[in-house]
Image (cartoon, rainbow, N blue to C red):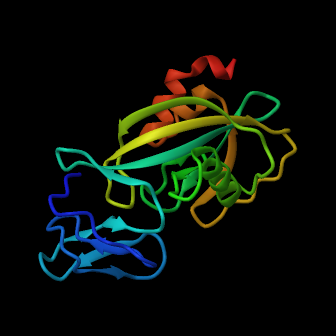
Amino acid sequence: MKFTQPLPTVTDHVRRFCISCQTETVTMIGSTPPYTWSCSRCNTVCDRVLSFGMNTILSKSSDDTLWHESVAVFVFNDDRKILCFERTEYPIGKLTIPAGHAENDKSLEASALMELEEEVGIADVALSLIDSEPLHESCGWGIDDHLWHVYRTSVPSSTTVVLNDEGVNPMWLTAEEILLRNPVFGLEHFTRKHLDLFH
């Protein structure tokens, strides 16, 4: 996503811009997922908007492309299966793992640990970085490019998983099962790239 104007100043709230005309003229339709947005300037209705704020790491390259820095965690159980769940927010219904945007006031690892605890209720684990790679993948915040930092951890198969409102249907899957179940692009990419971790 290219954004030709200067990055907006954000203090204590999120500023939202239309993904089509890039003006701050959008309102949310409804109050529960799946979210949709309407622009009063160009009359576009979209399932995502350009969002600035919430302490996320956002940069703009010399060609005006917006980038998020993001983290994800492969959580393995005793059977070498990965913890996955289905998203309730954009992209709705896609299979994912604990992941989210890195935050300005946290290290990448601390951001990953925060996402892990917030999204699936797993805390107090050790993480190891397995990959960092830029990918063209869209998110609900209207950004289409992300620099991903991917971690791994292991937990006992008896670990209790508690999903927040961003996901439903937690499941433990093999790499082959992940690839057959409509994963988000990043999950598919890193699963294929790191198949050796599953065996």
Q: Position of residue 66 (x, y in %)?
A: 28, 51
The quarter holding residue 164 reads bottom right
- Is 162 in front, or is 7? 7
Q: Position of residue 117 (x, y in %)?
A: 71, 56
- Is 9 in front, or is 167? 9
Q: Is any atom of residue 123 visible in this view?
A: yes
Q: Position of residue 147 (x, y in %)?
A: 41, 40
Q: Is residue 198 left or right of residue 195?
A: right
Q: Residue at x 36, y 67 (%)?
A: 52
Q: Residue at x 43, y 78 (%)?
A: 13
As drawn, 2 above or below 50 = above
As drawn, 159 above or below 44 = above
Q: Is any atom of residue 47 visible in this view?
A: no
For the C terminus, which image quadrant? top right
As drawn, 1 above or below 6 = above
Q: Position of residue 135 (x, y in %)?
A: 37, 36
Q: Is residue 48 left or right of residue 18?
A: right
Q: Is residue 60 left or right of residue 88?
A: left
Counting labels gives 0
Q: Residue at x 45, y 38 (%)?
A: 186
Q: Residue at x 69, y 45 (%)?
A: 171
- Is 170 in front, or is 108? 108
